[in-house]
Amino acid sequence: MTDLSEYTLSQRKEAINEVIPSKRDREILCMRYLDGHSYKEIAEIKHLSIKRVGTILRLGSAKMGAYLLKKDL
């Protein structure tokens, strides 16, 4: 998973809004990277498996990381 800890909350929020088209996936990424919820908490709230949440976070964080790296250049 891409390390997004070096970016501010506003940078993370911008990346989520710019590169994640799915409303559900944006909400999940915000829950994790802005609000600090655990995979289990997100899975329970969204009625998804922990594995599915992990997949959404892995793919989303990769897109976010690529966007933020590109923006830094």
Image (cartoon, grey):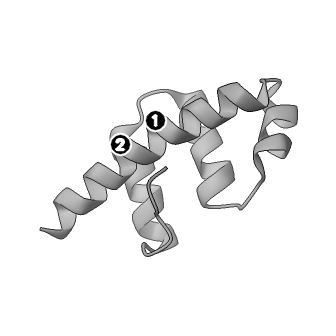
- The answer to the question of whether label 1 and label 2 lie on touching residues, with beta carbons closer than 8 A, is yes
Q: Give me the residue at 50% from left, 71% from top.
A: 5
> Which image quarter: residue 40?
top right
Q: Position of residue 27 (x, y in %)?
A: 62, 40
Q: Position of residue 21 (x, y in %)?
A: 41, 29
Label 2: how many Cα within 10 Å (few below 14, some 14–19, many 20+): some
Report whether 35 appears left or right of 3: right
Q: Is residue 41 above or below residue 72?
A: above
Q: Position of residue 38 (x, y in %)?
A: 78, 52
**Label 1 residue SS:** helix
- Residue in the foreground of this view, choosing between 59 and 23: 59
**Label 2 residue SS:** helix
- Spatial CA distance of label 1 from label 2 is 6 Å
Q: Give me the residue at 44% from left, 54% from top.
A: 2
Please give the residue where the numbered disc 2 appears in the rendered image. Answer: 63
Q: Is residue 38 above or below residue 51?
A: below
Label of residue 6 in the image? none
Please give the residue where the numbered disc 1 appears in the rendered image. Answer: 59
Q: Give me the residue at 60% from left, 58% from top.
A: 33
Amino acid type at mark 1: Leu
